[in-house]
Amino acid sequence: GQGGMEWEHFDGFWSSRWMANGNVNFRASDAVSMYVETNFHSKYPNWPSGGFYYHLTGFGMRFYPGVSRGSKSDNIDKTDVLLGASVPVAWNHWEFHKGAATVQGNFYLD
């Protein structure tokens, strides 16, 4: 988990920004892990026209295609593949985001 706050001064008044994030990973096997994460952002809560906030939740699976079936650590490849999605949970002034899908591949160098 992570959280933070910052202050900003412009146009003659002070305003705050709030951020919070959480992530949980579950390693189902040597070759597959699952994750769920959440992100919350709030900006300018004391603006005369109201503040701005959005809250996303993401989930997905990560695959490690190089893991050998017979050994947990001897033949681990340098690649992984992630499949995931994010879904907006709560928001204001942010009407057009309906969610996103993610496909990511990583190759790690020595």
Image (tube, rainbow, N blue to C red):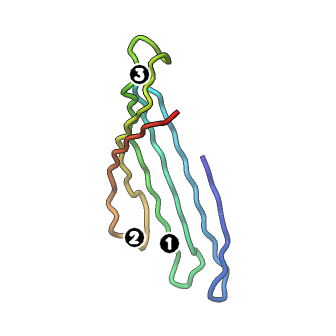
User: Residue at 66% across / 88% down in the picture?
Assistant: 12
Q: Which residue is mark 1?
A: 52
Disc 3 to disc 2, C-alpha distance: 42 Å
In x, y percent, where is residue 106? 42, 40
CA gap, disc 3 and disc 1: 44 Å
Identify which amino acid the numbered label 1 is placed on.
Phe
For residue 94, the mark is 2
Q: Is residue 71 above or below residue 53?
A: above
- N-term mark: 3 or 1: 1
Between label 3 and label 1, give the one nearer the viewer: 3
| Residue 106 vs residue 24, the one in the foreground | 106
Q: Residue furthest front?
A: 110
**Disc 3 or 2, which lies upstream in sequence?**
3
Q: Which residue lies under the disc numbered 3?
A: 67
The secondary structure type at the circle numbered 1 is strand
Specify few, some or many for label 2: CA neighbours under 10 Å numbering under 14, 14-19, or 20 or more.
few
Q: What amino acid is found at the position of numbered circle 2 in the picture?
A: Trp
Residue 109 locus on image (x, y percent): 49, 36
- What is the x, y in percent for residue 48? 55, 85
Residue found farthest to the top: 70
SS type, badge 3: loop
The x, y position of residue 58, in whole percent, is 42, 48
Q: Earlier in the sequence, mark 2 or mark 1?
A: 1
Q: Amino acid at mark 3?
A: Val
- Residue furthest to the bottom in view is 12
Q: Are marks 3 and 1 in contact (CB under 8 Å)?
A: no
The answer to whether the residue labelled 2 contacts the one labelled 1, judged by CB atoms less than 8 Å apart, is yes
